[in-house]
Image: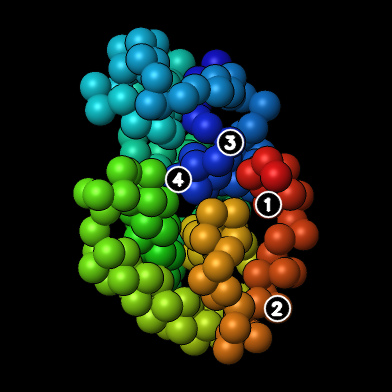
Amino acid sequence: MMKLFYTNTSPYARKVRIVLFEKGLDSQVEYILCNQFDDAVELKGYNPLGKIPTLVLDDGRAVYDSPVICEYLDGLNTNGELVPLGRDARLHVNTIQALADGIIDASYNIVMEGRRDVAVRSASSTVRWEASIKSAVKQAELYIQTLTDKICMAHITLGAALGYLDFRLSLLAWRTGHDDLAMWYEALSQRPSMVSTRPPD
C-alpha cells in the first residue's frame, strides 16, 4: 500500500488528496498526518526536503512534490484522465494548473511571512504577492469559461487554491468582482472529493 505524508491544512496536499479521490485510489493509500515543521523523522527519511505532500510507493520509492505526485497518480489508471492527452488540450489544462499553483504559492508565502517576527516582515513582498493573487484570480475567471464540466487538474488545482484563500486569507475577499468564478467554485465545492478534503474550521 502507498503512503501519503500530508497535513489537512496544506493546499498542496489537498490537491493530491482530491486526485486520489477522483481517480478512485483513496483506498489504496495509508494517510500519515504529519507536521513538517516538527522533527518529522520518518518523513525526512523519504524526502530530504522534509516537505509535504510526499508519496511513498509500494516499492519504497518516494515521489514529490504535488505536481509530480498528481501526474504519477493520474497515470495509474484510466478512470478519467485528469490531464488530457491531446497536445493543445494538455497545454491548456497545465497552463491553468500553473496559474492556480501560483495562487497557492503566493498565498502560502503571505501566510508564512505573517508568522515571522514583525520586525523582520517584508511589507513590500506581501503587497507583491497580494497583487499576484488578484491578477491571477482575474485571469482564472476568464479561464473557467473554457473548461468543460469534466473534472481535470485545472478544476482540482484552482479549487485547492481558492479554498486556501478562503481558509487562510479570507480578508482578500477574492469573490469581490468575480461573480462567475465564485459561482463556479461554489458548484465545484459540492463534489465529494472537495468536501472530504476541506480544511478544518
In the figure, residue 131 lies in which quadrant? bottom left
Are there few (<14), some (14-19), or many (20+) residues within 10 Å of tag 1? many
In front of the other: label 3 or label 1? Answer: 3
- Distance from disc 4 to disc 3, alpha carbons, whole Å, reads 10 Å
Q: Is residue 76 above or below residue 137?
A: above
Q: Which residue is mark 2?
A: 183
Name the kind of residue labelled 4 in the image: Tyr
Nearer to me, 117 or 194: 117
**Mark 2 vs mark 3: which is more N-terminal?**
3
Report the quarter where the C terminus lies.
Answer: top right
Q: Secondary structure at mark 1?
A: helix
Please indicate whether residue 140 sits to the left or right of residue 192 in the image.
left
How far is mark 1 from mark 4, CA to CA?
13 Å
Q: Earlier in the sequence, mark 3 or mark 1?
A: 3
Three-letter amino acid code at disc 1?
A: Met
Three-letter residue code for mark 3: Asn
Among numbered discs 2 and 4, the one appearing first in the sequence: 4
Which of the two discs, 4 and 3, sits closer to the camera? Answer: 3
Q: Which mark is residue 194?
A: 1
